[in-house]
Image: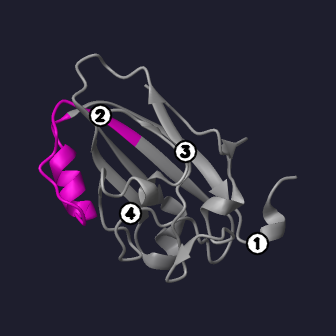
Amino acid sequence: MIVSSRDIVDGEIWPQYGKFGEMLEEDVPTRSFPLQATCAPAETVSFAIRMSDPDSVPIAGYEWVHWMVVNLETVDLPENASVEWAEQMIQGTNDFGTIGYGGPMPPDKPHTYVITVYALDTMLDLQNGFTKEAFEDAIQGHILAEASMTGVYPHTIDGFSD
């Protein structure tokens, strides 16, 4: 399986998808980036997505979860799907305490974010607002394949490439 996004270029998440973007809800970035997954196993029934920040461990004490989505029939999400498709998607509660995408906001240095797509053999029995613990429990034993991509988001606006 291959995971990609046209707006994560040369390993860098574009500014509009994090703290330097213009779409904020209670100071949390809400504009999600486009995301695709291809070459999934033929027996895939649904897909799940998890975006997390392993660089947050020294600050928060755990890997910060920015986005979780389950029960997708395909992964071909346009920009801002977390908001614009909110009625059609089942999204979990991120570590900002909101449902849906909460974009990068590195407080100390550039952080590397991991976006993982799971191909599953079932639909999951989860509802909007599910927790990361419920997500982990639900996918156990149902993963046919998984693939990840990473993207760095700078701490300062001048940290972006030209």
The front one of 109 and 5 is 5
Residue 126, given in percent of the width and then of the height, sits at 16, 54
Mark 1 or 2, closer to the camera: 2
Rounded to the nearest whole Å, what is the CA distance between mark 1 and mark 2?
37 Å
Mark 3 or 1, closer to the camera: 3
Query: Given the image, on which type of amino acid does mark 4 rest?
Result: Gly
Which residue is pictured at 80% across the width and 59% down the height? 160
Q: Which residue is mark 2?
A: 73
Badge 4 marks a residue whose secondary structure is: loop
Q: Which mark is residue 87?
A: none
Rounded to the nearest whole Å, what is the CA distance between mark 4 and mark 1?
24 Å
Give the residue furthest to the left.
125
Q: Which mark is residue 100?
A: 4
Place residue 74 in its image quadrant: top left
Rounded to the nearest whole Å, what is the CA distance between mark 2 and mark 4?
18 Å
Quick check: 128 left or right of 98? left
Mark nearer the N terminus (4 vs 1): 4
Q: Which mark is residue 34?
A: 3
Query: Given the image, on which type of amino acid does mark 3 rest?
Result: Pro
Characterize the local packing of mark 3: few (<14), some (14-19) or many (20 or more) Cα atoms within 10 angstroms.
some
Q: Which residues are magenta?
A: 117-142
Q: Which residue is mark 1?
A: 156
Query: Given the image, on which type of amino acid does mark 2 rest?
Result: Glu
Residue 12, given in percent of the width and then of the height, sits at 69, 50
Rounded to the nearest whole Å, what is the CA distance between mark 3 and mark 1?
23 Å
